[in-house]
Image (cartoon, grey):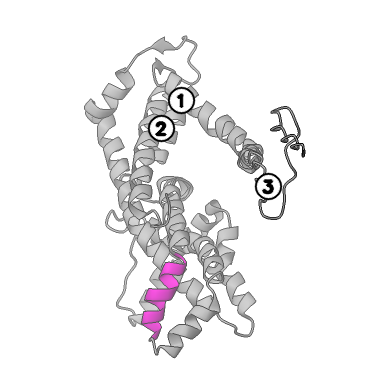
């Protein structure tokens, strides 16, 4: 009589599972949580800390102090304590004809200066950058010559242009026009005439600042791959087509940056106006700017409270205009 073999019992749950064979690969382990994003955020915060500290110390704190001073009647050299005025300084700035007239005229001059300087200076800088972005002999010398006016202080540039635009026959511009016209051109007061005072400031400022924008655009042009121009030449694209479809898209972000930088600098125009008004016979009403109005109100009229109100209002106007410009001309690939 044969005996039946006992059946194998099913393995219990606590027993070790069978080893993984080639037919059934093991499940991959769960990847660790990425920490690169957190590290990048920390590195960015550490790198931006010096700039943020400088911005708060040299822009935020002075602006806050100017806001506080604009609510008081503060007089330089006055033995009386500052009196709280509330919004009186702002009300006078827009309703008092003696204050609102010069302020609105200065604001209009600033806007006129910016509207002319920003496109003209940017276009000239782009043209010079394209001209100097060539492999020519002594190209470094030409780049240095065009950049040299940027190195000069604005006060020195204003003195030089005061000699060029002098009202007498000895003025360099008047003398040159007198020679070219065979003696038919007489002396003309370029700085004192209301029709040419602001134009003189614009020409002076463009001449002094175009080299800085040129260098920035030149760096942008040198980042465009040469293969794009070679492909355009193979497609028989003209110079204008290459400029329109290769150059401009390649430096769009740089152009936006240059336009915004020029706009901010154009609203800060002060040095040349102050130097030429005080010592060059510049027409004060025709070339008055908001910064000039604020400085003269604070130190010539000793009215620090009113000057603070002017700077606060002007600061807010510039911020709003900059944000609008940033919204309009921002690159397409920017979030």
Magenta-colored span: 238-251
Whole-angstrom CA distance, mark 3 to mark 2, is 70 Å
Q: Is residue 197 visible?
A: no
Image position of 59 (left or right of 33):
left
Which residue: 42% across, 47% down?
277
- The answer to whether the residue labelled 1 contacts the one labelled 2, judged by CB atoms less than 8 Å apart, is yes
Q: Residues within 10 Å of mark 1 (few under 14, many from 20)?
A: some
Whichever of callouts 1 and 2 sits on the residue coming sooner in the sequence is 1
Residue 221 x, y percent position in the rendering: 52, 70
Which residue: 48% across, 81% down?
229
Residue 115 x, y percent position in the rendering: 32, 55
Up the image or down, 21 lies above or below 220; here it is above
Q: Which is more toward the observer, 10 or 193?
A: 10
Which residue: 42% across, 63% down?
122
Up the image or down, 128 lies above or below 44; here it is below
Say which residue label 2 marks: 311
Residue 114 x, y percent position in the rendering: 35, 52
Q: Which is more toward the observer, 279 or 73?
A: 73
The numbered disc on residue 26 is 3
Q: Secondary structure at mark 3?
A: loop
Which of label 3 and label 1 is nearer to you?
A: 3
């Amino acid at each position: 009589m044969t005996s039946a073999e006992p059946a194998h019992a099913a393995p219990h749950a606590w027993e070790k599972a069978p080893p993984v064979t080639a037919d059934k690969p093991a499940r991959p382990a769960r990847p660790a949580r990425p920490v690169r994003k957190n590290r990048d955020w920390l590195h960015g915060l550490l790198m931006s800390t010096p700039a943020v500290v400088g911005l708060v110390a040299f822009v935020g704190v002075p602006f806050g102090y100017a806001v506080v001073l604009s609510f008081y009647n503060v007089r330089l050299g006055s033995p009386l304590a500052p009196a709280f005025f509330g919004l009186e300084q702002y009300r006078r700035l827009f309703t008092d004809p003696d204050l609102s007239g010069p302020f609105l005229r200065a604001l209009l001059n600033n806007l006129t200066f910016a509207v002319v300087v920003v496109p003209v200076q940017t276009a000239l800088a782009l043209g010079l950058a394209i001209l100097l972005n060539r492999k020519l002999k002594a190209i470094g010398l030409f780049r240095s010559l065009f950049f040299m006016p940027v190195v000069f202080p604005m006060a020195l540039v204003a003195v030089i242009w005061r000699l060029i635009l002098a009202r007498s026959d000895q003025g360099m511009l008047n003398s040159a026009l007198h020679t070219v016209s065979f003696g038919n051109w007489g002396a003309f007061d370029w700085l004192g005439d209301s029709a040419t005072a602001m134009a003189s400031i614009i020409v002076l400022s463009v001449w002094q600042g175009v080299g800085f924008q040129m260098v920035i655009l030149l760096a942008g042009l040198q980042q465009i791959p040469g293969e794009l121009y070679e492909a355009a030449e193979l497609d028989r694209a003209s110079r204008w087509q290459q400029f329109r479809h290769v150059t401009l898209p390649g430096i769009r972000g740089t152009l936006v940056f240059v336009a915004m930088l020029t706009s901010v600098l154009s609203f800060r125009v002060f040095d040349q106006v102050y130097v030429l008004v005080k010592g060059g016979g510049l027409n004060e009403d025709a070339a008055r700017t908001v910064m000039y109005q604020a400085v003269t109100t604070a130190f010539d009229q000793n009215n620090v409270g009113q000057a603070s109100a002017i700077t606060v209002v002007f600061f807010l106007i510039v911020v709003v205009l900059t944000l609008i410009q940033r919204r309009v001309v921002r690159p397409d690939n920017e979030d």
